[in-house]
Amino acid sequence: MIALKFGKTGEGSQTKGEANLLLFLICAYVAAFAWSWGPLGWLVPSEIYSLEARSAGQAINVAMNMFFTFGVAQIFLAMLCHLKFGLFFFFFAGFVLVMTIFIAALLPDTKGVPIEEMNSVWRSHWFWGKFVPEDDNDSA
């Protein structure tokens, strides 16, 4: 709707009904992200780290989240001027695609795995197994 009405010039107009529909669709887009991918940045680290590394992993997660939020906030207006309507949909949809590929390729399934056994899950992963050291205290 934004692309059809305003194009790349940003000049155009909408009726009140179209504006209300557009506002609803943008809110639905944001809500869908907030209910699906949004919380994963907080949930995944709390589920995948072993007990020994959980607090350090969450601390790094929070620091990275704040750093990248700051970065996005700093470049948002410049990106909005250059990408126009593409910023909200194509740019962020591209990142959802990257996140989907990352999750599918690099995160192991941890359903039903107790937190005490997470080291063995990471050790047996095709990629991350190269980085997890053997531990004599593990029961794996």
Image (cartoon, rainbow, N blue to C red):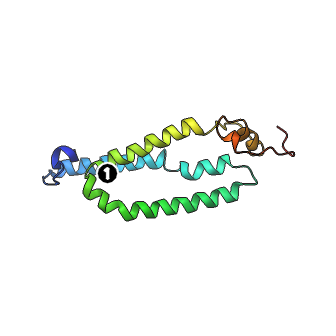
Q: Residue at x 38, y 48 (%)?
A: 92
Is 12 left, or right, of 80 in this rendering? left
Residue 99: image location, x then y, percent: 49, 43
The quadrant the N terminus occupies is top left
Residue 67: image location, x then y, percent: 50, 63
In front of the other: 52 or 46: 52
**Quick check: 23 above or below 122?**
below
Q: Residue at x 19, y 48 (%)?
A: 17
Residue 100: image location, x then y, percent: 49, 39
Residue identifier under label 1: 87
Is 129 left, or right, of 135 in this rendering? left
Residue 106: image location, x then y, percent: 59, 39
Q: Describe the element under mark 1 as helix, strand or loop.
A: helix
Q: Residue at x 38, y 65 (%)?
A: 74
Number of other residues with Cα within 10 Å of mark 1, as a class: few under 14, some 14 to 19, many 20 or more = some
Looking at the rendered structure, the kind of residue marked 1 is Leu
The residue positioned farthest toward the left in the image shown? 12
Is 83 left, or right, of 105 in this rendering? left
